Structure formats: C-alpha cells, structure tokens
Amino acid sequence: MKLRFLGGAGTVTGSRYLLSDEKHRVLIDCGMYQGVRTLRRRNWAPFPVDPATVEAVVLTHAHIDHSGYLPALVKNGFKGKIYCTKATHELCKVLLPDAGYLQEEDAKYAHRKKFSRHENPEPLFTEKDARESLKHFESRHFHEAFEPVPGFEVKFTPAGHILGSACVHVTHKGSARTVVFSGDVGRQNDLIMRPPEPLHHADVLVCESTYGDRTHGESDPETELADVITRTAGRGGIVLVPAFAVGRAQMLLYVVHKLMGEGRIPRLPVYLNSPMAIKATEIFCRHHKEHRLNAAQCELIDDKTQFVRTVEESIELDAARYPCIIVSASGMASGGRVLHHLKTLLPNPRNSVVFAGFQAPGTRGDALVKGADSVKIHGEYWPVKAEIHNLDSMSAHGDYQEILEWLSQGELQPRQVYITHGEPVASDTMRKHIHEKFGWPADVPDLFEEVTL
Ligand SMILES: [Zn+2]
C-alpha cells in the first residue's frame, strides 16, 4: 500500500491523502486551500492524479479545508462514491453549495473590478457543481466497517472536533497494515464536544499539528469572553464574533446564553448572522446525542438567539446603535457576511471583535489578531479602532499537550507517524514532541511525497 500526500503538507489547509495499491485508489479528504494567495492558487492547479482514476473518497469531517475541493473533483471526472459519517453528510449539504455560491460571487466580483488576469474569470466550481457532487455521498455509522474500494476496509471513530468529525482507520487487506488518519482532533475538555476516542491500533498514523508548537494556556475562555462583553456593553459598543459556521458558532451561542443565565454578563440581544451557521445550528441540535449539549440546552440556543436570515435584516443590523452581540461567519474573516459587519464596526473604538480559533496565515483574521492598523475589505482599506481579541482557548483543535494525552490513552505502537496539517514550525515541533514522548519514528512529509507503508 502506498500513501501520497497531495495536500495538508506544510500548511493547515488543503487536506488530501491518496492511498493506493496496484489495483485501487482511495482519497482521504479532498480539501480546498485557504489563506495566502500562493496557497489559494493551488486550488486551480490540475489535480495531481486524474480524478477519474480515484475510485472513492473518505472524509474525516465537513470543514471546507477537508471537503471543499469535492465539487471540482467531480466536475473533473471523479465517478465514485464519497463516504462520511451521517452528520458530516448533513453538514456538507449546507457547506458545499455555499462554497460554490461564494466561488461564483468571487468570479463575478473579479470580473466587475477587472482584477483578474482572465477576460472572463471562471469560478473553481459553481453551486450547481456542488449539488452534483452531493449525489455521490454515502454515509456510514461510527465503528461500522465498510469497503469503499475492494481490499481497503475503513472505519470511523469520533474525533471530537466538530459534529460528525472522525478519525479514519484504513486497513489494507493485502498487506494487513492499518493506517489511521487523525483528521482534526478535538479538545480533551471542550464545552460542547466530547473528547476524541482513544486509538488502539495503527501501523501508521497520520496526525494533525495545527497547534503543534503551542498550548491554549490556562486561561478560562468563559471569563475572558464575559470581560470583553461586559466592557464593550458598558461603553455602548457591539461585540462581533467571527466564527466558523460549523462548530464554534454553536459553542459561542451556548456560552453567551449560559453567561447571561448566570448573570455574568448583561442581557443583550444576540444575533446569529450567517444563513449557513443557522442551518448548521439546526443540524447540531438534531444530532444532540453526538455532543455534550442536551435537547433543552440546544433549545436555549434556539429560543434566545435571533436568526438573521435575509440580506435586508443583515444590513439593518449594521446600523444597530445599541449594545448587542453578533455572531457571524466566516471564522477567519476570509468571506461571508462578517465582512460587512467588519467594515461598519472596525473603525469605531466602542466595538470589540472576538476571534475564537486558529487564524490561518494570510487571512484577515490573522492580520487583525496580529494588530494590523487597517485591513483591506472589498478593495478598500478600513482602519482598525475596535478592540480585537483572540480567544485561542476556544479553539476546536487540541493543542499539542492534548494530542499527546489523547495518543497515550490507547495502546498505540505505530511503526511510523507522519505529521501533517500544520504550519512548518508547528509540524516539526509536533514531530519532536511525539518522538520524545513515545519514541515513535515521526516525519513531516513534503507535498506530493509518496511513501510505501
Ligand atoms: Zn476542521
């Protein structure tokens, strides 16, 4: 069995791993690149192998950096099935068409502003392409073994990162070798997700390293958030929280309502302004057995949050003159409705912007948490006068200590570990931590490197 790293090497986005033997090819994750332009440009390169020769795709979870290239893969000739957990399937039904819509909008915008080198800039894929790719989906239960292609047996175990997220275990029957892809790994003590299930067997482990060189620290995210909200409300400002539509948006809403219930912050109107996050919240509540919140707690989110569905309502919200809390996507401020709010709210020192997770290099979120005094949005520069916070401790990714703790919970004894899904320094530091703690051989693969397992 061979493993080729087609993405997620040297960066946190574009996760794509190809497993093959003499006869068959299966792709694990099919993500889009996000962040700096040199990375995004990779989305436009021809797929490194002919998509028609890939027989199946298996997804770890729904986030776009793991699933977002699927519509392009199908458009370019992929004919097989796409396997994932039930909740991942539900979330992809929302996320992928939205990604297609955004691609179309970007292409139209580039055309209008004439900043594309092409006469007629084309979207990478359209909403229609995304809907086409959804026809290839098939869901499987956690722990249920299945064979996406002959000779490769696959199983999902909970990864605790977002709803439906899984570690993917692949056993190659011919060589009797098992390789486990961690996918994105959740926290040991998350407020809404249960911890990742320990791994008990892997000959080869492919492990993420988003926080490979950092810890989330001892700070208590609830107290930090309560302080920012109270302070901002005190000066009559608005608290804007750019959040990933799937995962952190639901957690933030839960925390905000909990803080209000406990009297730790003033009672303010709470708006969720992201049609995608609204749908994701509905899916989250429907699958309440898969996370820590019970039906009543989900209902609390539902009852106390004002869902902003239309563009008109969204524009009205921008003109709000009273303290309130707005949760909007995207989490790294790379697109979506949050951009309009940023344009209105950033130039006023009364307001606060609170980021709640990893900000990929090159994104506006990254620039803002690093203290930029202005950011470019829709072709114009906007001064940053609002208070900016990064509540890293609210991240949906375990830090390196949590990942080491998780790896020590099972009876793992891999003969090789490959560290992926991290910036170069983070991945290399994770490699050292794993080698030092467990003595396992660990390596950081290069993009397009192929190894025999
Ligand atoms: Zn993720």
Image (tube, grey):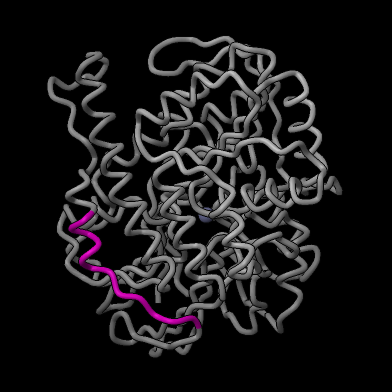
Q: Is residue 413 left or right of residue 30?
A: right
Residue at 69% x, 16% y is 350
Image quarter hosting the N terminus: bottom left
Q: Residue farthest to the right?
A: 218
| Residue 291 visible within the image | yes
Residue at 59% x, 39% y is 270
Magenta-tinted stretch:
131-142
| Residue 427 visible within the image | no
Q: How many marks?
A: 0
Q: In this view, does 350 lie to the left or right of 424?
A: right
Where 270 falls versus 22 (above or below)? above
Q: In this view, does 379 lie to the left or right of 419?
A: left
Residue at 76% x, 47% y is 259
Magenta stretch contains residue 428: no
Magenta stretch contains residue 132: yes
Q: Position of residue 300 (x, y in %)?
A: 61, 57
Which of these two is toward me, 336 or 423?
A: 336
Residue 298 appears in which quarter of the rendering? bottom right
Q: Where is residue 5 in the image (x, y as percent from the top left)?
A: 43, 58
Residue 56 appears in which quarter of the rendering? bottom left
Q: Position of residue 152 (x, y in %)?
A: 37, 83
Q: Position of residue 285 (x, y in %)?
A: 51, 64
Which of these two is toward me, 57 or 451?
A: 57
Q: In this view, does 50 lie to the left or right of 242?
A: left
Which of these two is toward me, 211 or 308?
A: 308
Where 194 falls versus 115 (above or below)? below
Residue at 52% x, 45% y is 244
